[in-house]
Amino acid sequence: MTEVFARRSSGLVRSINAWETLIFNILVMAPSAVYLYGIWASVTFPGAYLPATALMCIPICMVIAIFYSLYSAAAPRSGGDYIWISRTIHPGLGFMVNFFLFIVLISLVGTEIPWTLEYAIAPLLVKMGNPAAAAAILNPFLMLGLGTIYIIACAAIIALGSKFTARVLLVAFFIIMAGIITFVVTLFSLPPGQFATNFNASTIPGNMTYQGTIDAAVAIDPVVLTFPIVATVLGVTFTMINFLGFSQSVYIAGEIKDVRRSQFIAIIGAVIVFGIVTYLIYAAAYAGMGGQFISSISLIYVYGDPYYTMPAGITGPWFTALFIFATDNIVAYFLVVLGFTVMTWMGGLTLFYTCTRLMFGWSFDRILPTKVSAVDSRFGTPWVALIVCGIVAFIFGILWLFSTIMAFFVYIVTGWFVGNMIASISGFIYPTKMKESFELAPDIVKRKIGPFYTIQWAAIASFIVSAWMAYSGMTPTISGAVNVANLAFTFVFWVIAWIIFGIAWFYHRNRIPLELTFKEIPPE
C-alpha cells in the first residue's frame, strides 16, 4: 500500500463531530446569501412566490442528500465523489468531476470581499448618511488588497487544523443566525404599510415611491402583481441553485468522527435547516416589504428603467439595502449587515477548506505530486495544498476584479449537476464494482428492496433530479440564450482535467502504474 498510494495512512485526523459537520454544510450553502438570491430569482422567474419555492426544494434536494449520505457512509474518504467515481467507473472521469468542482469553489473565494463591501458595508454607509463613502469603497484595488488579507486569514485558520476551523465556524454560525433572526423578527413585526411609509419618507430612493415602483414594473410586465403557480414551480429550479453545497461534507469525510452517522445528520440536516431558514427570510421579506414590491423593484432595476434612482452606493435592491427602510434602529441594521458579512467570510473559508482536501485526495492517489498531500504533523493540515489553493484563489480574485473572463462561467449549474449524475451512476454500480467495500457498508446501504439495494434506488432518484437540474441550468431562463463560447469556456476545465490525468498516467506508466491505485479505497 505504501507503494500504491502516497503513504500508508492519510495523516488526516477525525476531529469534527456531527453537529460541526452540519454547520460546515450550512455555511457552504451561505444562508444569508438569500438576501441577494431573492432579487435575482424575482427577475429570473417573475411572479414566482419565493417562500413556497424554498419549501418545495426541501423534498427535491432530499433525494440527492439521501444518496450522498448513503454513499459517504459506505466509502467515507476525503475526496467524496472523486473517490467513488474513480474506483467504479474511471479515475480520469472522477478527476474530471472533482477538478471542475475545485475550479468553481476556489474561484468563488475571490468574491467574498467584493460581496462584503458591495452588499453589506456600502448599504450600511448609506444608512448612516454617507453615500459618497459607500460609492468610494467599491474600488477594485481596495477590494484586491482586502481580498489578499482575507485569503491569508483563511489560510491561517485552516493551517491551525480541522478542529480549530470547526470552532471558528461554530462561533460564526451564531453571529450569522443572530443577523437572520433580527431580519426576520423585524420584518414580521412591522405594522401593515409601515415599510411603504418609511420608503416614501426617505430621501435615499430619490424620486421613487413605493406605489410608483410597482406601477413602473407593471408597465413592463403585469405578472409582478400576481403569483401564478406555474411561475412558482419554475422558480424552484432557481431556488435549488441556492441549496448547492448541502453534501459538501463528503469531501472532508476523512476528518469526521463517527462519519457514517455524522454524514446523515450533516447532509440531510443541512437541507432541512437551510430550507426552513430560506423560507423564513423570504416569508418575512414578503410580509414586511411586500411581495409585489420586491418583484417590482427587482424588475425595474434589471431592466434599467429610468424610474429606478437608488444612489450609486446601493448597486441593487438587495434585501440588505431594502432593510434600510424597515427600521430606524441602527443596532438592528448593524446585526443584519454583520451577519451577512460573517456569512460571506465563512462561506469562502469552507470553500477554501474543501479545495485543500480535494487537492489532497488527488495527490494521495499520485495524480498530483505526492508532496502536495504532505500533512503537518501537529495540526494535521495538508500545508502544501493549502499554499497552492491560496495562490489559485488570489489569481481568481484578480480575474474577478480586473477582467471579464469570469462572466464566461455561465453553465456552472449544469456542470455541477452533471457531476452529480456521474456520481449517481457510480453509486448504482458500486455494489458490483466494489464488492468488498460494499459488503463492509452499513446495513442501511445494502438493504435489498425489490431488485435493487437501497443505495441503487437512491442513485436512480438522484440521477433523475440531477439530470433535471443539469438541463435547467442550460435553459435560456437560467443562463440566457445558449452561447457556444460560454459553453466551451465552462467545460474546457473538463478537458484540462483529462490532460492533467493523462500526464500523470504517462509519468507513472513505467514506474508504479496508476491503475493499481484505483483498485482499492484509500487508507484512512
Image (cartoon, rainbow, N blue to C red):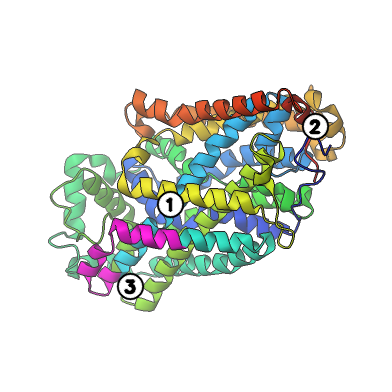
Q: Which residue lies at the image location 19% right of the left edge and 40% below the top edge? A: 220
Residue under numbered circle 2: 520
Sooner in the amino-acid sequence: mark 3 or mark 1: 1
Sooner in the amino-acid sequence: mark 3 or mark 2: 3
Q: Does the rendering let one see residue 51?
A: no
Q: Main secondary structure of the magenta part?
A: helix
In the picture shown, does residue 221 fall above or below 318?
above
Q: Which residues are magenta?
A: 125-149
Task: Quote the CA–CA distance across marks 2 and 1.
Answer: 36 Å
Q: Amino acid at mark 3?
A: Thr
- Number of on-image labels: 3
Q: Amino acid at mark 1?
A: Gly
The x and y percentages for residue 263 are 71, 48
Nearer to us: label 3 or label 1: 1
Residue under numbered circle 3: 327
Label 2 crowd (10 A; few <14 / some 14-19 / many >=20): some
- Report the disc number at residue 110: 1
Task: Quote the CA–CA distance across marks 3 and 1.
Answer: 32 Å
- 384 with respect to 5 (left or right): left
The x and y percentages for residue 410 are 39, 35
Q: Does the rendering let one see residue 383?
A: yes
Q: State which quadrant residue 23 falls in.
A: bottom right
Secondary structure at badge 1 equals: loop
The x and y percentages for residue 226 are 31, 43
The x and y percentages for residue 203 are 16, 69
Q: Which residue lies at the image location 16% right of the left edge and 57% below the top edge? A: 309
Query: Cβ–Cβ below 8 Å for labels 3 and 1?
Result: no
Q: State which quadrant residue 425 falls in.
A: top right
Secondary structure at badge 3 equals: loop
